[in-house]
Amino acid sequence: AMRSAARGGRAVAEAAARSWSRSPTWWSFPATQALRGAPPTCGVPSGSIAQKPWSRSSFRHESSWSSSSSQTAGTSSMPSTVVQRAQMGLSPAAAANKTAGAAAVAAGIAASSPAAPFALGQTGSLRSLLDQLRVYHDLSKFKLSAFVVSTAAAGYALGSGEQIDYVQMGCVTGGTFLCSASANAFNQIFEKSNDGRMARTMRRPLPTGRCSRGHALLFAITCGVSGFAFLKETCNKTTAELGAFNIALYAMVYTPMKQAHWINTWVGAIVGAIPPLMGWAAATGKVEPNALVLASALYCWQMPHFMALCFMAKDDYVRGGYRMMSHPVFDATGRRVAGVALRNALAMLPIGVVAVACGLATVPFAYEAGLLALPMALSSAVFYRRPSINNARRVFYGSLAYLPLFQLLAVYHRLPRLDTVNTVDTDETQTQSLFKQLTSFEIPSDPYKWTAWSARE
């Protein structure tokens, strides 16, 4: 009986998938060959984003390119979203999200699974719990949030004195993780429809129906409020304000700007540069010019990292309706994207020297940081000379290796601060605003001196 049910379930799933793949859908897009062969128009009808990239009509119609307008001699329309999801290994149930046959396909897959009776009968509660934890894992973008936490920990270590308070470091990393999870959840709430059209994001909880928007909103608000309260209670007000500001900047500015202008990448780089300032503020109770060294390293690092990513996934970003610099309308050859990556990779070369000059690290760090940034600069130069997927991939994976090594070297060669103060909020720090701290820098009498900005001078 189970074998018969399994065969029937598979038959239903296959029939539904074939019917959806044959039917014309509003998310059909031009063929990849047509897109690459005509970058000025991108294979879209007249009056769309290719001709008027800033018009209101282009915002409404770019995501609904018709398959009839994308037909060219010798080419066929791009496979539908259902087929793309099948090629990625997604179940037909996930591919059928928001369609009439979703229930039938889900029933077919459940019946065709040999472990279904066991899972429902004996381990249903445990499996449900694990599935829910997986949803929260994906809403928070766990790997990305863990990466962000490492930068906050590095900022805390560089701002500490002779002894590092690892308990408070754990508090600032935990609060930073909650803030990052909140921002990432808000991002997915706003971009649910866009994520469903992109191959790299269509498996997220909201597009696949594993989580409702209301549930995700509750998760985002809970993480944001608890992260702010936790940072304010265990660290100080400045750190908590930086965390709240970063959530707002990411969710309310960067996220909507992705669909409006390619300058969004620069805004996103500012978001990524703030967690080190949070770590520094947790250790010292304030934001100082020396803290901007690690923040600058994060800012410059993000540009070649993300420019390589958006070049590799440029077709996917077009399908999602995002206006990245890699869009064929803005950069048909890839040279502009590669140029941004190269300029910022070159700016990373002297960061070690600046850190030594500011009294953050010992002299060997200047040489090690320069040598560490050199491969990224060279790979970015190759990417600029010959923009291609392979060269962009080298820049991308090289950037993944650079940042952890840079932070480890910075912490290893750090010079303990001599003027470390109690970071618990006093009456003065509670009334002093973050804006006042950022604008109350004291300019040295000789700002051009090698160690003028050093905390140890």
Image: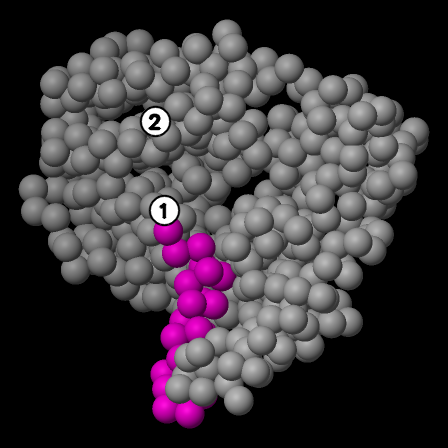
Q: Nearer the viewer, residue 201 or 37?
A: 37
Q: What is the three-letter code of the residue carrying label 1? A: Val
The kind of residue on which mark 2 rests is: Gly
Q: Residue 148 carries which label?
A: 1
Above-or-below relation of 438 to 250: above
Q: Nearer the viewer, mark 2 or mark 1?
A: 2
**Residue reaching furthest to the left:** 162
Considering the numbered disc 1 on the image, is that residue within a helix, a strand or a loop?
helix
Which contiguous range is marked in magenta? 120-143
Look at the picture and state if 288 lies above or below 387.
Answer: below
Would residue 351 be counted in the magenta stretch? Answer: no
Give left or right: position of 126 versus 249: left
Residue topped by disc 2: 398
Residue 295 in which image quadrant: top left
Q: Callout 2: few (<14), some (14-19), or many (20+) C-alpha neighbours within 10 Å?
A: some
Q: Which of 307 and 84 is in front in this view?
A: 84
Residue at x 44% of width, y 55% of height: 141
Q: Of all residues shown, which one is farthest toward the top?
A: 385
